Amino acid sequence: MLFEEDTPITLKQENFLSNENNKSRFISFLKAHLQKRNVSVTISPDDADPVIVGEAIDLSHVSKRNVVIVGEDIDLLILIIELTPSDMTSLLLKLSKETVP
């Protein structure tokens, strides 16, 4: 399926991304779109979890600011615990599935 920025996608996400050409083109499109807005983008060819944690740690060191990682993957938690240097503080929160009024 060829698509442009304004092309409405009528396929289910799973079906659309199961096609490697669609997936690759969408990633390239999304990367360019974010970079135009000065968002740093790193493409991971494999498991992104170590890249996410590593980039967050590096960004925190460079910017001297707090960095937040949001995710539901237990691998992220394990990597944060394992890779965070001892001179940095990690605050780990578990979000409630309940809605707050």
Image: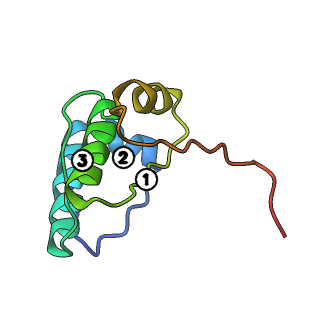
| Residue receiving disc 2 | 16
Note whether 86 is above or below 69 in the view shown: above
Query: Disc 2 vs disc 3: Cβ atoms closer than 8 Å?
Result: yes
Q: Residue at x 37, y 32 (%)?
A: 86
Q: Secondary structure at mark 2?
A: helix
Res. 72 in view: yes
Res. 1 in view: no
User: Between 19 and 98, which is closer to the camera in this rendering?
Assistant: 98
The picture places residue 78, in percent across and down from the top left corner, at 47, 25
The picture places residue 89, in percent across and down from the top left corner, at 45, 43
Q: Residue furthest right?
A: 101
Q: Which of pointers 2 and 1 lies earlier in the amino acid sequence? A: 1
Q: Residue at x 37, y 69 (%)?
A: 8
Query: Disc 2 vs disc 1: Cβ atoms closer than 8 Å?
Result: yes
- Mark 1 is surrounded, within 10 Å at the Cα level, by few (under 14), some (14 to 19) or many (20 or more) other residues, namely few
The amino acid beneath tag 2 is Phe
| Residue receiving disc 1 | 11
The amino acid beneath tag 3 is Asn
The amino acid beneath tag 1 is Leu
Q: Residue at x 30, y 34 (%)?
A: 48
